[in-house]
Image (cartoon, rainbow, N blue to C red):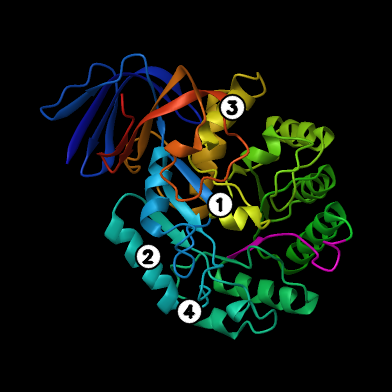
Amino acid sequence: MELLIRHARVVDCSQDFLGDVYIKNGVINKIGKNLEGNCRTIDAKGLVLMPSLVDLHVHFREPGFTDKEDIESGCRAAVRGGYTMVNLMANTNPPCSSMKTINYVLKRIREVGLIDAHQCATITNNFDGEDISHLDELSGDVKIISEDGKDVMNGGIMLKAMMKARKLGKIVMCHSEDGSLSDIDMRLAENIMTWRNISFSEYTGCPVHIAHVSTKESMEYIIRAKSNGANITCEVTPHHIVLSGNNYRVNPPIRDAEDVNYLVDSIKKGWVDAISTDHAPHTKEDKQRGAAGISGIETAFSLCYTKLVRGGHITLNRLSQLMSRNPSRILKVQKGLITPGYDGDLILVDLNVDYIIRSCEFKSKGKNTPFEGRRVFGKVIKTIKAGKTVFEQEI
């Protein structure tokens, strides 16, 4: 399959020019100006061509919770949001503790055929908090283990899991929360466990990725550890850098303006590695019962572009680094750059278009969002996967 995209403003983490991109056999073959080819051609004049987005933190709920989301609806939501690669969390039913369940998910991803995915495995077997023997049975395709939705409370077990993960060449992704403190002080619950997980990483040398950092103190711990050479990466979510003083139910909670400002400043200074959505769809009934989470994969780019780029905090290049290049690097996939040899996964966006977020337009089953009615800029017009259009904005 061949595709020539012409007259675009081509932007990734390290370049910004007017020109053309030629994709052949699903891979970027040439970039430049005045390229020619006897193939399908898209005239992208007035649009920005960027690497498609890569999300390190997503819940597609299958198997087990398909009333909230399933793999097909999740994939359709992803491409509408500009994503062609996601990292799926393991808190399904059954949990992703065995290659049987993991392979089921990946088979379903291939059957839908819209995006690529990595499936995390649980840190402890079926989230029992104690048994890590299943880690030895995981294939090399499993690059990340995570107990997402909670943390491993037993420090000895977590330390042993990190030792084993380092030996097996896997990243430990941490939802930093001390559950014994959650009902007392959610800030303290996050801060204490962030410090613990960083300390364990420093002790074992295991690569650790800290999920959805939301407090100033947790980010301070991460910055200190990174400054000392720790093998740490971290992410923030769109809702934790856009909202403050809001009681919309998410975990970790929406924080104060001081936290938001500190997170944004940390993005500007290069301490934050990735922006991830923590896409967590719920039914209306579950949300009314207090379920924590945002259906965020369809609104992430626009929210971040509006807040960070139009807000004057970072460049579009830096946003591409946070939402494409760095997540690709962590997942060790050939995405996130517009350069020959990289996957032909791209998005065309109109940065001049503003629109109102309406959850009724979501492809996700989950309509749970605190951004209903918010005006944002930067609309994904087309999502291209391996040279094939997998989403096109309806006119």
Which tag, 4 or 3, sits closer to the chain's start? 4
Quarter of the figure that contains the N terminus: top left
Q: Is residue 280 visible?
A: no
Q: Nearer the viewer, residue 5 or 113?
A: 113
Residue behind mark 4: 98
**Foreground tag (2 vs 1):** 1
Q: Earlier in the sequence, mark 3 or mark 1?
A: 1
**Residue pointed to by mark 3:** 374
Q: Nearer the observer, disc 4 or disc 3? A: 3
385 sits left or right of 255 in the view:
left
Stretch of the chain drawn in magenta: 171-183
Q: Where in the figure is residue 319, as x and y percent of width and height?
A: 56, 31
Residue under numbered circle 2 = 106
Residue 68 versus residue 119: which sits nearer the camera? 68
Residue type highlighted by circle 4:
Ser
- Residue at 73 percent of width and 79 percent of height: 157
Mark 3 lies on a secondary structure that is loop
- Whichever of callouts 2 and 4 sits on the residue coming sooner in the sequence is 4
Q: Quadrant of residue 206?
A: bottom right
Q: Are marks 4 and 1 in contact (CB under 8 Å)?
A: no
Q: Secondary structure at mark 1?
A: helix
Residue identified by numbered label 1: 284
- Residue sitting at x 34%, y 30%: 393
Query: Does label 4 or label 1 sit earlier along the sequence?
Result: 4
